[in-house]
Amino acid sequence: MTPMKDESTALKISAGANLFFGLLGIGFALLTQSGAILLDGFFSFIGFGIGLLTLKVSGLVERPDDEWFHFGYAYFEPFLNAARGLILLAVTGYALVAAVISLLHGGREIVPGWALAYAVIAVVGCFALAWIQRRAARANESPLLDVDAKAWLMDGVLSLVVAGAFLGALLVQGTRWDPVVDYVDPALVVLLVLLVLPVPLKIIRDNLGELLRVAPEPEVQAEVKHRFAQAVEGQGFRDTRLRMIAAGRYFYLLNHIRVGSSFRVKRVGELDAIRADIHAALGDLHPRLVIDTLFTEDESWMG
């Protein structure tokens, strides 16, 4: 199956699927009285709302700079992803508190047969969407789709745990373990929250790092510096300073090169040739690489 080459189409499919699973989850939650299914439905509705915003942002980040945003719209992408992580964190926190209260008050009666039917549908649908969105993310080199694929994978894992728990509740119903069934749903919510918690925390950490302009991982910096050194080897530069940040789907690299008093160029084109060599050495490191190379003889201009 060929992955989707159109980011907006993939996002629309995801938004539509989230709306479907949100409505399905709320319907089955009312039928089964299950807090775990209700939580899953809320996750889907959040995904639908964020999906609509994501469609707008995916168009914005491709726009060139203008009179309002002189450096473009790249930071809208990590901003949206960080907001998504914060919303997921808030919902899981609320669900955890409600589940603990339920456990302390004798649990919650559910209808495990219908709950299991919902969980099976959700498992198949979520894992299918995670696979489709992951392939689309790679084809489009899109951080938005990458986060969306992780969200669907998270939903799929949650639904798989739900299916296993409700299957167990169905098997023990009517046996001497029957009183345990009322505790299955709130206990399941607690387990789901503990399983899912690392995902929004990682999304928040990574995207807040981009918003705060935190430098990339040390291994990425080391690779950039190594290739840069190879590109300018033999030029006789006195010093260089590299600064780099990621912003959504873009990677920005600012190079300050300090030349010696003996360095002479006859025309600007010779400097552009050095810039071209640097870009050729680094170009395959990132699909959206933006490089600025500045030359100076005075160290104070290197910052």
Image (cartoon, rainbow, N blue to C red):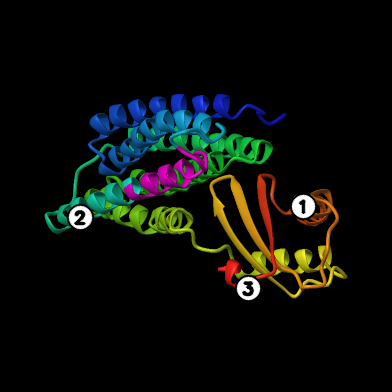
| Magenta part of the chain | 69-86
State the image coordinates of residue 30 (x, y, percent, origin top left).
23, 30
Q: Nearer the viewer, residue 3 or 303?
A: 303
Asked if disc 3 and disc 2 are in contact, CB closer than 8 Å, the reply is no
Q: How far apart are the alpha carbons under marks 2 and 1? A: 52 Å
Q: In the orientation shown, which residue stands out farthest toward the bottom?
A: 238
Label 2 residue SS? helix
The three-letter code of the residue at mark 3 reads Glu
Q: How far apart are the alpha carbons under marks 3 and 2? A: 57 Å
- Quick one: label 3 or label 1, which is nearer the N terminus? 1
Label 3 residue SS? helix
Q: Is residue 106 magenta?
A: no
Asked if disc 3 and disc 1 are in contact, CB closer than 8 Å, the reply is no
State the image coordinates of residue 104 (x, y, percent, origin top left).
14, 59
Question: Mark 2 = which residue?
Answer: 97
Question: Mark 3 = which residue?
Answer: 299
Closer to the eye: label 3 or 1: 3
How many residues crowd around disc 2 within 10 Å: few (fewer than 14), some, or many (20 or more)? few
How many residues crowd around disc 1 within 10 Å: few (fewer than 14), some, or many (20 or more)? some
The three-letter code of the residue at mark 1 reads His
Asked if disc 2 and disc 1 are in contact, CB closer than 8 Å, the reply is no
The three-letter code of the residue at mark 2 reads Val
The quarter of the image holding the C terminus is bottom right
- Quick one: label 3 or label 2, which is nearer the N terminus? 2
Residue for point 52% across, 32% down:
58
Question: Mark 1 = which residue?
Answer: 279
Left or right: 241, with 232 as reference point = left
State the image coordinates of residue 15 (x, y, percent, origin top left).
45, 28
